[in-house]
Image (spheres, grey):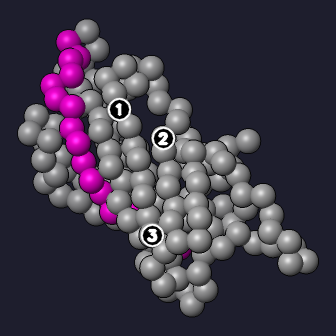
Amino acid sequence: MNRGRKIQIAMLACGLVLASWACSNAISEKSPTVSSVAGQAEKFPDTWRSVTTGKEYYVRRDKTHLYAQWVNRPPEAAQHGAYIHTSCKLEGAKYTGNSDIYMPCVIGERKNAKIANTCHLNLGIEIDSISKDRITGRGQTLRKFDCGACKVIEAGWANFEWVPAK
């Protein structure tokens, strides 16, 4: 597989993983909360790193919502306006929502690589566990994608794990 195609697939996969990370339909009866010691809330980290992709996200939340934004965008992706914005709402025992993703699609290899399209996707995400040391859940992923048409041919779900970036 050529380098350009690998970059294209990696960028789209990372976006999907973020979607997976942002929200989840938990089986647990407890709402996702930050662990506390002796009744005192612990500091919730601002920046989280995906164990799977290495992407970093600025995460903020309140009592009923969680938001994440991709912050360590590669220069080439940033130059083309790439972003991942995730918004989730607490529903029962987990956060569920969507990741709004805008990514350039690269066709060709190395010197012949070119951006064929810039695709906008909206993928589901679920977060089922949040602590000061770890965020876990699952997100929609692309199994088959038509870059030229920005069309999802086959999607699935994948688990994710995030840890504090610092």
Quarter of the image with the N terminus in it: top left
Q: Are marks 2 and 1 in contact (CB under 8 Å)?
A: yes
Label 1 element class: loop
Q: Main secondary structure of the magenta part?
A: strand
The first of marks 2 and 3 along the sequence is 2
Asked if the magenta segment contains residue 124, the reply would be: yes
Residue 34 location, x and y as percent? 70, 69
Residue 82 location, x and y as percent? 35, 32
- Farthest residue in the bottom direction? 29
Q: Nearer the viewer, mark 2 or mark 3?
A: 3
Q: Is residue 116 above or below residue 20?
A: above
Q: Which residues are magenta?
A: 112-128
Instruction: Please name the residue that numbered disc 1 is placed on.
Output: 82
Residue 58 location, x and y as percent? 57, 45
Identify which amino acid the numbered label 1 is placed on: Ala
Q: CA distance from mark 1 to mark 3?
A: 24 Å
Residue located 86% across and 72% down the image:
40
The image shows a total of numbered marks equal to: 3
128 horizontally vs 2: left or right? right
Residue located 18% across and 46% down the image:
145
Residue 94 location, x and y as percent? 50, 76
